[in-house]
Image: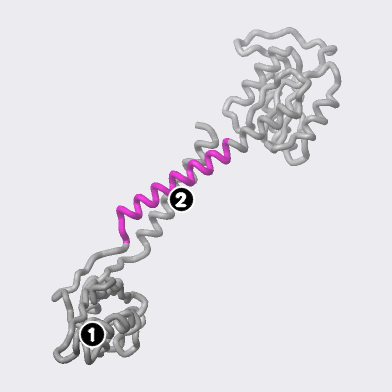
Amino acid sequence: MGRPVVAGTLAAVLTGGGVLATTELAGEQYEGRVSLVAGPVAGGGAAQYGEVVSFTLPALAELARSPSVLRTAAADTGGDAEVLANGVSVELVPASGLARLTVRVPSRELAGDAASAIARAMIKADLLAPAAALRVLDQRPDVIQVSPDRPFGLGLALTVAAAAGVAVGSLRHLRRTSALAAVRTALPDRPPVVILRADTDDLTERLARLCVVAARPPRVLAVAADVESTARALDNRLSRRLGGELTAPDGRHTPDPDPVLGEAVVAVTRGARRQDQLATVAALLPEPSVLIAVVLA
């Protein structure tokens, strides 16, 4: 499995798990819903009723949040007025005289009781008098659980995980591709070289095979100071693998390398978008030596 795939999978798991954990740890929330309807009262007059409802009904949203209504509801239900204030809302149905009161709280029982208590307090305030009056349309409030919404949370987590995985995987792939392109750009006039990553499982074996084919002793060069430790470790592994003389993978000994042929050079560099130092090192190699591979640390 390539590094972009691993990075994308890890990002997907972490991101999706974080979103799912956040939705699950948000705490339970319940909504109590009750409908209020405005109706005319005796002697109010149809014209006066219409005007009062049109101009006054929008004020129900502020009435529901008023301290007097919330204190009355909190006293009736044993809840907290501040909690109720944060969870109460009123939705008006246009041209109908209907208002939907919603109360969101952490308890199912409190959600229903608070919706009924706030509705009673709003009716008692008699905001539409003398032309109209409010009455409860629903005898019992409708209570539903709104959080955590597990299907929604799971769907959101999967969506975010997929997006994060694709984004991170694509970025890692583009970064890897740009690093390979930078190496090839830095060595335009040289024969093609093998480009490997330092974490390749069979890196030492593959480089040893190249040295055997080239019939040259290996030389590992660090292109920059920050990769010297990686270059030294690779040089030690490669020297141990070849055992002081070039040995073919099938165990046969190859002839001793001709000193005139020089060395088989392995350049170790960072995976970057520009490889100016690599180009300089390659240009300064002695003529008999040959660059056989570039290792991206």
Q: Which residue is pictured at 70% across the width and 23% down the height?
A: 293
**Residue 47 numbered tag:** 1
**Residue 15 numbered tag:** 2
Is 2 left, or right, of 229 in this rendering? left
- What range is drawn magenta here? 148-173
Is 149 left, or right, of 208 in this rendering? left
When asked about the image quadrant of residue 221, the answer is: top right
When asked about the image quadrant of residue 180, the answer is: top right
Neighbourhood count class around disc 1 (C-alpha, 10 Å): few under 14, some 14–19, many 20 upward: few
Is 176 left, or right, of 134 in this rendering? right
Q: In front: 1, or 94? A: 94
Q: In front: 45, or 174? A: 45
Q: Is residue 22 above or below residue 253?
A: below
Residue 281: x and y in percent read: 81, 29
Q: How is the image coloured?
A: one colour
Q: Which residue is pictured at 68% across the width and 24% down the height?
A: 238
Query: Judging from the image, what secondary structure is the residue with disc 2 in?
Result: helix
Q: Which residue is pictured at 73% across the width and 28% down the height?
A: 185
Q: Is residue 258 above or below residue 23?
A: above
